Amino acid sequence: MVRRAFNALLFMLVSSAFTIAISSSGYAQSFGDLLRSTQGTPTGAFGSMAIAVKPRSGLNPAAGWHTAVSKMQRDRVALERCIADPGRCAGEQRAWAEMVRDARGVSRAAQLERVNAFFNRFPYRTDEELYGRSEYWAGPVEFLAHSGDCEDYAIAKFFTLRELGFGDADLKVVVVDDTARGVGHAVVTARLDGIDFVLDNLSARVVPENSISYYVALASMNEGGVWVDVPSLHRRPGWERMASLQ
């Protein structure tokens, strides 16, 4: 994710997080509700409080996500075709299909490792380089053809894990502030046996989410919804980082 697009997202979240209007029961309705929610047990990624975004609320923390979901639905056909007849698919699509087919016979933990390793071997390439624009969310087939940047790795991994049988509720693409590098980033989290693991294009290892202290979640998404992730008061660096950017 390029720095300019990340800054735009971060400033939007800081200014909008306190005015989210969600009609469903159990969600923050006001600043007071939101502030009280940050004092409870964290419900979102990396110790944050996840607040669901109503589709028509006007708050869109990840404009490219809905397009990416449409691309994933389209690419499902391509993957199934490749698995059924590898001879109809060339290059990385064939390798992708073979990896998915083989991974269906291993444990869930091994599937996380295989998916992370398969996509991490692709070189990092920026949206400016590939598409001539500051932000573009590629689908899995586009990533296989061109590679991509951090959210493109995350989308390809998310989709592949869904095809391997992980439930949508157990997976999220998470946009974070990488405080160690001072840049925006995106990863996938996958819940397995009650523990959230992180698949990251910057790491060859799949590690528990709670072992990473330098990511502050800003927004998360799966096929079922989109959330703004507000730092919990239990994790002070998140609030300090957001306050410093206002």
Image (spheres, helix red, strand yellow):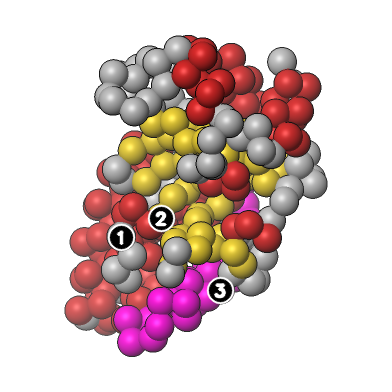
Q: Locate residue 64, reporting x and y percent.
A: 42, 35
Q: Residue at x 27, y 24 (%)?
A: 24
Looking at the rendering, the stretch of residues picked out in magenta corresponds to: 102-129
Assess whether mark 3 and mark 2 are in contact (beta carbons under 8 angstroms).
Answer: no
- The secondary element bearing badge 2 is classed as strand
Q: CA distance from mark 2 to mark 3?
A: 18 Å
Which residue carries the number 3 mark? 117
Within 10 Å of disc 3 (Cα), the crowding (few <14, some 14-19, many 20+) is some
Assess whether mark 2 and mark 1 are in contact (beta carbons under 8 angstroms).
Answer: yes
Q: Residue at x 22, y 80 (%)?
A: 85
Q: Quadrant of the N terminus?
A: top right
Mark toward the start of the polypeptide (2 vs 3): 3
Which residue carries the number 2 mark? 171
Whether residue 70 sits left or right of residue 107 in the image: it is left
Mark toward the start of the polypeptide (3 vs 1): 3
Q: CA distance from mark 3 to mark 1?
A: 21 Å
Mark 2 vs mark 3: give the one in front. 2
Compared with residue 180, is residue 240 higher up or lower down, i.e. above or below?
above
Residue 167: which numbered mark, if any? Answer: 1
Within 10 Å of disc 2 (Cα), the crowding (few <14, some 14-19, many 20+) is many
Q: Kindly indicate the quadrant of the structure image that contains residue 246.
A: top right
Camera-nearest residue between 84 and 90: 84
Q: Is residue 240 visible?
A: yes
| Residue type at the position of mark 1 | Gly
Q: Majority secondary structure of the magenta segment?
A: helix
Report if residue 121 lies within the magenta region. yes
Report if residue 215 lies within the magenta region. no
Q: Residue at x 51, y 14 (%)?
A: 32
Mark 3 vs mark 1: give the one in front. 1
